[in-house]
Image (tube, helix red, strand yellow):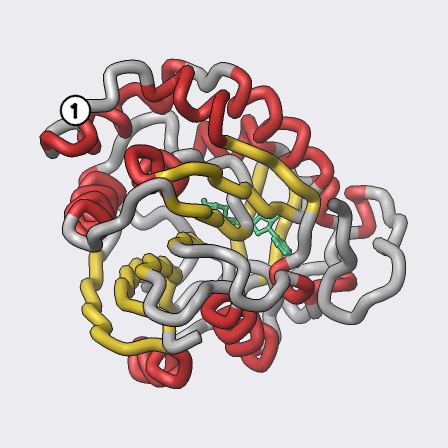
């Protein structure tokens, strides 16, 4: 399924050279200029301590959530497979919903057979016995993973039993209202009581992927927690400070787990 971004209508066709600096809304950004390999080189080629801790906590949360044979979703998957891996043992299906055509292409290849880059991330998962019991995660993802070009703003309501959305609400626009709407659409896409994990970057005003710049919104912790609390309960919050910094400015990473109100 291919769905439209924030403002609806067709995707704007602009060359990567015309990508605007932070200050844009989601529908104005040329997401097809997103280079998944450059993004991975900068963020995930080496497993960082902050991502390790976030993955451990996400893993332990889902392992304790009494999930099985679930319809799962990862929203704005981009070029990061670790949220999807955290859902793998519990999944009947995992829908990876992403808007950028280049990332969708990359995700389809990775779902078929993911790169060794992601083996250390699976190793972190497999420190937990529930995950260790899954002996061939690569084949399992090929079986349950489904990639679709879907905007967070067009997600169906009450469609999934568990979900993840990592570094999306903060990083798809410079508009605070769009961040709030992305969180609300994500939580509403889950059935009542579904467990979820959301990660956001706090304090980010933009980021580079290769030679392209993308907008972000400098979220603050209390506002994000309040936005999540509107659509969720049993919330747990953990903050990580990446060292060295991965974006300009004084950023930190917030992981929020909980259950959707639906
Ligand atoms: C900073 S990246 C995060 C990628 C990945 N989830 C991660 O954890 O690193 C933001 C992602 O949101 C995607 N995106 C942008 N607009 C979107 C929209 N309207 N709906 C869904 N995804 C969108 C981008 O293409 C990009 O992959």
Q: Is residue 22 left or right of residue 48?
A: right
The quadrant of the picture occupied by the C terminus is: bottom left
Q: Is residue 115 above or below residue 70?
A: above
Q: Is residue 33 above or below residue 123?
A: below
**Residue sitting at 48 percent across and 49 percent down?**
73
Where is residue 202? Give x, y as percent.
36, 67
Where is residue 36? Give x, y as percent.
57, 32
Q: Which of the two residues, 260 or 209, is positioned nearer the viewer here?
A: 260
Where is residue 136? Give x, y as percent.
31, 15
Where is residue 215? Give x, y as percent.
60, 61
Give the residue at mark 1: 132
Q: Which quadrant of the structure image shows residue 252?
A: bottom left
Whether the residue under disc 1 has CB within 8 Å of ligand 1: no
Question: Is the residue marked by circle 1 packed among few (<14), some (14-19), or many (20+) residues within 10 Å?
Answer: some
The quadrant of the picture occupied by the N terminus is: top right
Q: Which of the two residues, 161 or 117, is positioned nearer the viewer here?
A: 161
Count of picture labels: 1
**Residue sitting at 62 percent across and 61 percent down?**
155
Judge whether residue 95 can be spotted in this image: yes
Q: Is residue 164 left or right of residue 186?
A: left
Q: Is residue 159 left or right of residue 218?
A: right
Judge whether residue 220 can be spotted in this image: no
**Residue sitting at 80 percent across and 44 percent down?**
17
| Element on which disc 1 rests | helix
**Residue sitting at 38 percent across and 77 percent down?**
261
């Amino acid at each position: 399924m291919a769905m439209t971004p924030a403002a609806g209508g067709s995707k704007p066709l602009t060359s990567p050279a015309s990508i605007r600096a932070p200050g844009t809304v989601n529908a104005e950004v040329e997401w097809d200029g997103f280079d998944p390999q450059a993004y991975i080189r900068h963020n995930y080629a080496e497993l960082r301590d902050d991502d390790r801790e976030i993955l451990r906590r996400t893993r332990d949360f889902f392992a304790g959530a009494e999930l099985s044979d679930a319809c799962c979703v990862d929203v704005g998957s981009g070029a990061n497979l670790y949220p999807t891996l955290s859902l793998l043992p519990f999944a009947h299906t995992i829908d990876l919903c992403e808007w950028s055509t280049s990332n969708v292409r990359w995700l389809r290849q990775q779902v078929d057979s993911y790169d060794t880059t992601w083996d250390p991330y699976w190793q972190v998962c497999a420190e937990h016995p529930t995950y260790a019991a899954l002996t061939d995660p690569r084949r399992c993802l090929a079986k349950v993973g489904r990639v679709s070009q879907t905007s967070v703003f067009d997600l169906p309501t009450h469609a999934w039993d568990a979900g993840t959305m990592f570094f999306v609400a903060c990083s798809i626009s410079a508009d605070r209202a769009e961040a709030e709407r992305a969180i609300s659409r994500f939580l509403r896409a889950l059935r009542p009581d579904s467990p979820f994990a959301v990660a956001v970057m706090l304090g980010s005003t933009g980021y580079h992927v290769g030679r392209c710049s993308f907008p972000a919104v400098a979220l603050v912790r209390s506002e994000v927690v309040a936005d999540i609390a509107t659509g969720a309960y049993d919330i747990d919050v953990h903050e990580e400070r990446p060292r060295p910094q991965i974006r300009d400015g004084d950023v930190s990473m917030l992981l929020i787990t909980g259950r959707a109100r639906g």
